[in-house]
Amino acid sequence: MAIEDLLHPLLKHYLEAPRWLKASAAGHAYAWLPQSLRLGSAYNTFRGELAASQGAVAVGDLATRKLEATLSWAIETVPAYRQYRSLLARSGDPRELLARLPVTDKLDIKRDPACYLSRAMPASRRLKMFTGALPATRCSSISKSTARDRRSMHSFRTSAIESTPARTI
């Protein structure tokens, strides 16, 4: 587990701290931590996968395989996506499957947050998250991903958006 996940409960205090404290003490202390501790052990696995992928086509294939695994896992384990199992069975390209899935609105999650939690992950892996939206749509939710997973997905989404037609996103 990455240290960000262990420190997450303290985030509120960090954000409320004076700027000089964040910039000096906390920032420098964090920077002194070894990268393996800051990012978690799975980050090295992710970097190894990228290094083993020679060229843009191989990285694109890796992203496609990861998208396929993510969609399969979500459809099989998250109640809100259970109804799309038939799409999973007949879809060859995960980008086509993603294009067929509905966009989940924040209000859907707010109405029934438990419906969007995977049944395959233990409650001990949950992180409480808050959105930064207008009060009418502000949402508190539970994430079962780690901070490292969110960074990896951001990188993945960026590469997927750059290589995928706009209508698919």
Image: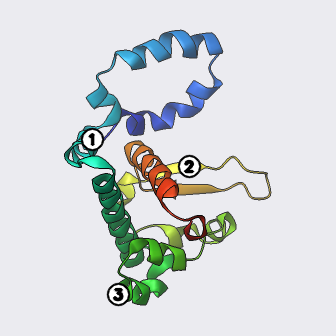
Left or right of 46 in this view: 147: right
Give the secondary structure at mark 3.
helix
Q: Are marks 2 and 1 in contact (CB under 8 Å)?
A: no
Q: Percent x, y for residue 86?
A: 41, 90
Q: Secondary structure at mark 1?
A: helix
For badge 2, the amino acid type reads: Met
Which residue, given by chain and number where applicable, does mark 2 sit on? 129
- List x then y, in percent, for residue 60: 35, 57
Q: CA distance from mark 1 to mark 3?
A: 30 Å
Marks 2/1: CA–CA distance: 26 Å
Residue 74, image quadrant? bottom left
Of callouts 3 and 2, which one flags the residue occurring earlier in the amino acid sequence? Answer: 3
Whether residue 79 can be seen here: no
Q: Is residue 113 visible?
A: yes
Residue 58 in percent (x, y) is at: 27, 55
Residue 89 is tagged as 3
Q: Classify residue 43 as left or right of residue 71.
A: left
Q: Residue at x 65, y 71 (%)?
A: 108
Q: Quadrant of the N terminus?
A: top left
Residue 50 vs 78, above or below: the answer is above
Residue at 56 percent of width and 25 percent of height:
14
Element under label 2?
Answer: strand
What's the residue at 54%, 32% (across, down)?
Answer: 11
Q: In the rendered image, which residue does mark 1 sit on?
A: 47
Q: Residue at x 34, y 34 (%)?
A: 39
The answer to which of marks 2 and 1 sits earlier in the sequence is: 1
- Pointer 3 local density, CA inside 10 Å: few below 14, some 14–19, many at least 20: few
Q: Amino acid at mark 3?
A: Ala
